[in-house]
Image (cartoon, rainbow, N blue to C red):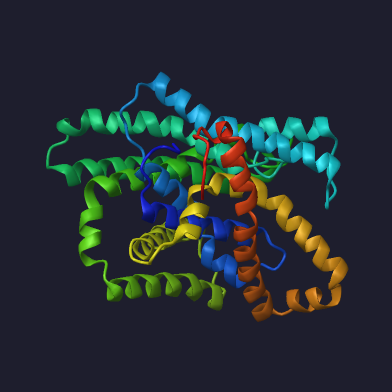
Amino acid sequence: MGASKRIVWVDVVKYICILMVMLSHLEARTDVWQAFYTPFFLSAFFFVSGYVYKPKDGFKQFFYKKFRQLFIPWLVFSVFDILLSQILSFNEHESLLTELTWNFLQIRGHGDGVWFVAALFVAFIPFYFFIKWYEARSEKITGGGYNKCTVAILIAWILSLISVLYTRLLPDGTFPWGSAALPWHIEYIFQAMFYMVLGYIFKQMFEKKLDKWNDRAARLVVCLIYLLLVFILYVSGIALPMVLDVLYDYILSIVGIAAVVMIAKRVPSNRYINYVGQNTLIYFALHGKCYSLIQTVLKRVAGGLYATILGNVVLSSVFALLFALLLSIVLIIPALIINKWFPFIMVRKRARTI
């Protein structure tokens, strides 16, 4: 993972998305920001995970690789975060045993530390078998590559739709923990797999075509379409029927991913963006304590000014973005430490420089 050749635009996409992840957790986040980043900031992570996947291993080798790349870091970081919370906490928390229990159950919304990494690990399992089926059956589907990928995308989307309908239709009190969520994000994995399949097929079938017409005008059009789709409902406040709302969410996510990918393929990168993009797992795991500390200090040192900022949509929106950028810089320090002294956690060789 660490030794493999990096794809620069993939790291740029991951950089953009991890900024949105951090932004989504801040007290200063606003409804405007949430409307903008919610459709794409997680689905784009799944998209690039599918894009970089290479189906060359048997299941045993594949599972071991993902176990080392995803499960072990999840285990280390989630348990570390819980242990640290018992020593240094800025919010109320439960007993160590209770928090560890919820963590190992991984039920969304119930102490599911570093949940995204756990969900990605589980989603890779059906994705592996889906891609294996897709490649094995490709020669049996007549009509060329586009028919092959159309069938695959349709099946992946149907599985995703079933998962979405499950989460929307089942009442919150279905299970003792008060929601329809299942342990280890089982209800979510086919939603994740759909975007992973899109990323995999995009690399095979559509990337070269996108690169040919990805000029400034095309990027502007796609971004304007995305913003228009986002803010039409946000400004109007129209509540769509459930079926239309679900389809609208899919369209928003796909257009949002397209916009981010097109931008990432053309904007100049640098060492800072690349480094953050290469260490998003560390950022996902550690940003919580960092922003909690800074927010606590702000409340104690400049409580009145901070409250004024939070009370103003424009000021809060600008402050939140600057705060997320600050976090991305601050977290370079623990990322450097982990890569230099504890690279085995991330299945990497010891880093000598940034």
Q: Position of residue 198 (x, y in %)?
A: 34, 47
Asked whether residue 49 appears in the rendered view, the answer is yes
Residue at the (37%, 67%) spot, across then down: 267
Residue at the (84%, 67%) spot, across then down: 299
Left or right: where does residue 205 sit relative to residue 164? left
Q: Give the farthest residue toward the front.
A: 352
Residue 297 lies in quadrant? bottom right
Quarter of the image where the N terminus is located: top left
- Name above or below for residue 275 compared with residue 158: below
- Name above or below for residue 219 compared with residue 115: below
Between 309 and 228, the residue placed more toward the observer is 309
- Name above or below for residue 93 compared with residue 224: above
Residue 186 lies in quadrant? top right
Left or right: where does residue 296 sit relative to residue 291? right
Q: Position of residue 55 (x, y in %)?
A: 32, 31
Between 18 and 174, the residue placed more toward the observer is 18
